[in-house]
Amino acid sequence: MRYTVAFLSLWMTCLTTACSQRESSKEATQARSSEASSEEAFLDSLQKDTFGYFWETTNAANGLIPDRAPSPSFSSIAAIGFGLSAYLVGVERGYISRDQATQRVLTTLRFLWKAPQNTDPVRTSGYQGFFYHFLDMQTGERFKQVELSTIDTVLLLGGVLSCQTYFDRDSAEEREIRQLADDLYKRVNWPWFQVRKPVLSMGWHPESGFIPSDWKGYNEAMLLYVLALASPTHPVEPDAWNAWTQTYDWMNYREQEHVNFAPLFGHQYSHLWIDFRGIQDGFMRSKGIDYFENSRRATLANRAYCVANPMKWKDYGPTIWGLTACDGPKDTTWVSDGTTRQFFSYRARGASGQEEVDDGTLTPTAAGGSVPFAPEVCIPALRAMKSKYGDRLYGQYGFYDAFNPSFPPSGWFDVDYLGIDQGPILLMIENHRSGFLWKLMQKNPYIQTGLRKAGFEGGWLDKKQ
């Protein structure tokens, strides 16, 4: 009898423990589900709000998108490229209809195709198929004396070609979109910018000629070389890619071994349209990783620098971080406790083995544009910034461009949104959630051709043979 009672007692104890464990497991599952639901709701609202920047601030008569808002601004051709892809996300997410996107894209591409291309320093929008960095919002003519920009033209073309691939129906309007996109791409005379072959110059002014700087070292120019290699009308030779990769700086920074480039935008922009997961060129094959992993390491290194906070700026930490090009308070110095602190206005901030540029100014696009690379640290950062700073940092179109809690006397918060920083937030979150742009551009023959000419192999690229 004693054994029976003891057995029953033990059985009841085990049953109670098992029930407790099941209940605990159920509660943990519910907690994870609730957290996932909360995260999805946050990303939903952030994407929709950010989309509003491109849809609502655009000049609907010509499709030109402002460099910044609400401050009066010229148009940024790179922002137009981000906007063209943003419209596609808008259709997929249900923010706008396919017909609304079709009309906006047609307006934009028609304007760009008809905009004057000549050597006139004023009454022009571009030359040799390239566009000037900034254009007047109303006329589309060159803004002041800005450069004819290779990289900004490429970011424009990223959006143009995404529309070419997306609008695949056999209607007159969608056929026109595909043709205009093709014409805009084929018009670009890439070799004209090879003044110091085989690399490409960064820009040109009608007043003074080519900019003395070339696209060397790892940065946002991967897409530039891919599209230049793929051109069916004015291509550059594959030695351009090889020459470019030979100028990379591979080093260990903050315990992350990778090709270094200080501002995070250089690790993000080309990845908006190209899925680099599992494909490698000769350089990355020699290192045993791909460019996606390289950007992940750069993101983690950027965060590690901010967590270490060697300059002791206010609020830096595991969820408040992010250095890249952005607005800043102003170009000035401030003496505090005998230490001179330097601050900047717009500046390419960043942290790498090459340089550390840090004035206490952080920007949400640093984490937002890196969400696919390291969601486990980027999404909590975005949520923490919105929670901590509220409407000082988050407004009608999502995150304002930048903030500096250390700027005297009580911190600085931007009043503007910047198109080239809003774009990566919206588009890279979409790539993280659905892979939409990556899957879309895998089908684009120019992207495939350019990657192969650059020596990329493996993964999805081999499957597209």
Image: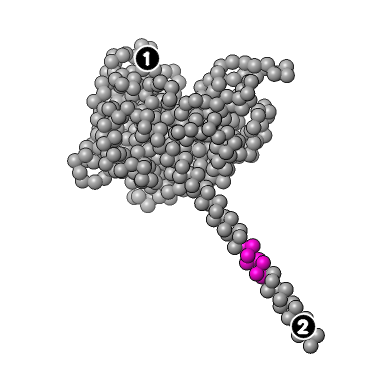
**x and y percent of residue 62 in the render?**
28, 27
In the rendered view, tell whether residue 24 sits above or below residue 79. below
**x and y percent of residue 320 in the render?**
60, 36
**x and y percent of residue 57 in the render?**
37, 29
Of residues 368 and 348, the one nearer the viewer is 368
- Label 2 neighbourhood size at 10 Å, few (<14), some (14-19), many (20+)? few
Give, as a three-letter code, the residue at label 2: Val
Of residues 338 and 31, the one nearer the viewer is 31
In the rendered image, the quadrant that contains the N terminus is bottom right
Q: Does residue 455 belong to the magenta stretch?
A: no
Occupied quadrant, residue 269: top left
Examine the rendering and report whether any part of residue 352 can be seen. yes
Which portion, as a residue range, is magenta? Answer: 18-25
Checking the image for residue 265, the label placed there is none
Q: Spot the residue most to the left.
A: 172
Q: Provide the residue designation for mark 2.
A: 5
Of residues 230 and 341, the one nearer the viewer is 341
**x and y percent of residue 101 in the render?**
30, 39
In the rendered view, tell whether residue 407 sits above or below residue 271. above
Which comes before the other along the chain, label 1 or label 2? 2
Give, as a three-letter code, the residue at label 1: Lys
Q: Spot the residue most to the bottom.
A: 1
In the rendered view, tell whether residue 344 sits above or below residue 49. above
Q: Provide the residue designation for mark 1.
A: 144
- Label 1 neighbourhood size at 10 Å, few (<14), some (14-19), many (20+)? few
Examine the rendering and report whether any part of residue 283 can be seen. no
Q: CA distance from mark 1 to mark 2?
A: 93 Å
